[in-house]
Image (cartoon, helix red, strand yellow):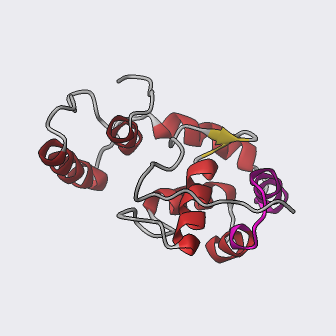
């Protein structure tokens, strides 16, 4: 089995929140963060499982600890994606479709305050960025990390 190298998230970004692995959004980013956590290179990122991770895990119906154990074992991206599909709860394909739509929907309710706080922090640390079109956390991450995103 080839050795999997963790990204150093003190020097580079995890994969885009919109990148998919075998039809599974968010999973590549989650994998990058778990590998970096094990390698001690997570940097300032929230440890696994962060809110975005928990959201994805809830959609597919996967236990966070079981998935972390698999990733920590050195499994490849393809092996991880297959495991997720094999262990996901019934109906996850339909929920993934809704998840994709939700990822680009404007934030409302209780999460709006969190987004506004994160935007203020970004404006302070990166005043050159135009945050005027950021209405959810996916767009915030894409803008901050330089990834393309619909609506930005």
Q: Main secondary structure of the magenta part?
A: helix
Which residue is depicted at the point 41% across and 41% down?
Answer: 138
Which residue is depicted at the point 68% across and 56% down?
Answer: 60
**Depicted 28 relative to depicted 62: above or below:** above
Q: Which residues are magenta?
A: 71-89
Counting from the top left corner in percent of width and height, residue 101 is at 53, 34
Which residue is depicted at the point 58% across and 66% down?
Answer: 34
Residue 41 falls inside the magenta stretch: no
**Depicted 109 relative to depicted 38: above or below:** above
Of residues 143 and 3, the one nearer the viewer is 3
Counting from the top left corner in percent of width and height, residue 141 is at 38, 43
Residue 85 falls inside the magenta stretch: yes
Of residues 139 and 127, the one nearer the viewer is 127
Counting from the top left corner in percent of width and height, residue 119 is at 21, 45
Q: With 130 as the anchor, is 15 left or right in this view? A: right
Q: With 26 as the anchor, is 89 left or right in this view? A: right
Of residues 150 and 98, the one nearer the viewer is 150
**Image quadrant assignment for residue 57:** bottom right
Counting from the top left corner in percent of width and height, residue 75 is at 78, 63
User: So how many labels did they put on this image?
Assistant: 0
**Depicted 17 relative to depicted 54: above or below:** above
Q: Quadrant of the N terminus?
A: bottom right
Residue lying furthest top: 151
Q: Quadrant of the C terminus?
A: top left
């Amino acid at each position: 089995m080839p050795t999997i190298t963790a990204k150093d998230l003190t020097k580079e970004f995890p994969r885009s929140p919109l990148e998919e692995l075998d039809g599974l959004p968010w999973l590549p980013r989650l994998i990058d963060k778990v590998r970096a956590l094990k390698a001690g290179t997570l940097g300032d990122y929230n440890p696994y499982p962060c809110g975005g991770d928990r959201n994805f895990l809830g959609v597919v119906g996967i236990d966070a600890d079981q998935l972390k154990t698999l990733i920590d074992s050195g499994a490849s991206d393809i092996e991880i994606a297959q495991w997720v599909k094999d262990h996901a709860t019934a109906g996850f394909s339909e929920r993934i479709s809704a998840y994709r739509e939700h990822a680009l929907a404007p934030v409302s309710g209780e999460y709006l305050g969190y987004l506004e706080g994160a935007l203020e922090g970004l404006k302070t640390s990166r005043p050159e960025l135009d945050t005027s079109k950021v209405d959810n956390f996916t767009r915030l991450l894409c803008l901050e990390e330089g990834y393309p995103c619909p609506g930005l």
